[in-house]
Image (cartoon, rainbow, N blue to C red):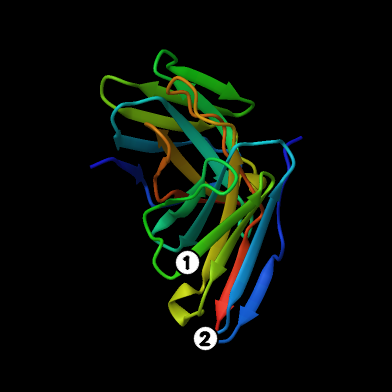
Amino acid sequence: KNQVEQSPQSLIILEGKNCTLQCNYTVSPFSNLRWYKQDTGRGPVSLTIMTFSENTKSNGRYTATLDADTKQSSLHITASQLSDSASYICVVSAETPLVFGKGTRLSVIA
Amino acid sequence: DVKVTQSSRYLVKRTGEKVFLECVQDMDHENMFWYRQDPGLGLRLIYFSYDVKMKEKGDIPEGYSVSREKKERFSLILESASTNQTSMYLCASSHRVQRRRNYEQYFGPGTRLTVT
């Protein structure tokens, strides 16, 4: 069964600190992996999208990695800001439709 | 910029009412999707559409129907709203899948529906 598991479920960090969110998937065949950021009460917004051949992609302070052999991805946030407080959703594409993780709820506190 | 708009941000309806949620996209996308999002369950696909007048069931279609009469517009219909349909509803759109490449899905802002 195609599944995407994210950890941790929730995370609280101090402003300015770094953090890493994890995503493990069992989706086949694999096409690409995306990370979305969803602010409370808003729709998800894409941060990165990686294909099978890419193992790192950055978007400002966000860096996503992909290990297609172990079927793992991580999202690293550097020098966190209060505005990073949101849910981060890992989404894996086989064929349409997409397979969504349940998200990690990140809270950045001052 | 891609824009996906939804007819309402917040909606309160009574049990048994017929509810229409509308979604419009302005990027000439072939694919459109309706999801619901609940705490602890993540996003779940209700229905999607590859083209005008085409529809496919997602993971949880029971209690819902959809309509796509025009390419830019995709409507979700709750024939007889029930309290367990209280949720956040998200619409998304994308270009058609080509050669196993899933194009970016763009999401609307969501509609928070409460059924009392």
What is the x, y in percent for residue B18? 58, 78
Point 50% across, 36% down: residue:
A35
The residue labelled by disc 2 is B16
Residue A78: tell me if it is visible: no
Chain bearing mark 2: B
Point 47% across, 73% down: residue:
B85
Is A5 situated above or below B8? above
Chain bearing mark 1: B
Q: CA distance from mark 1 to mark 2?
A: 13 Å
Task: State the count of labels.
Answer: 2
Examine the image and state in which quarter residue B103 appears: top right
Of callouts 1 and 2, which one flags the residue occurring earlier in the amino acid sequence? 2
Nearest the eye: B26 or A109: B26
Residue lying at the far left of the rendered structure: A1
Q: Is label 2 in a helix, a strand or a loop?
A: loop
What is the x, y in percent for residue A42? 64, 55
Q: Is residue A14 left or right of residue B59?
A: right
The residue labelled by disc 1 is B64
Is A19 situated above or below B60? above
**Mark 2: amino acid:** Gly
What is the x, y in percent for residue B62? 39, 67
Examine the image and state in which quarter residue B115 appears: bottom right
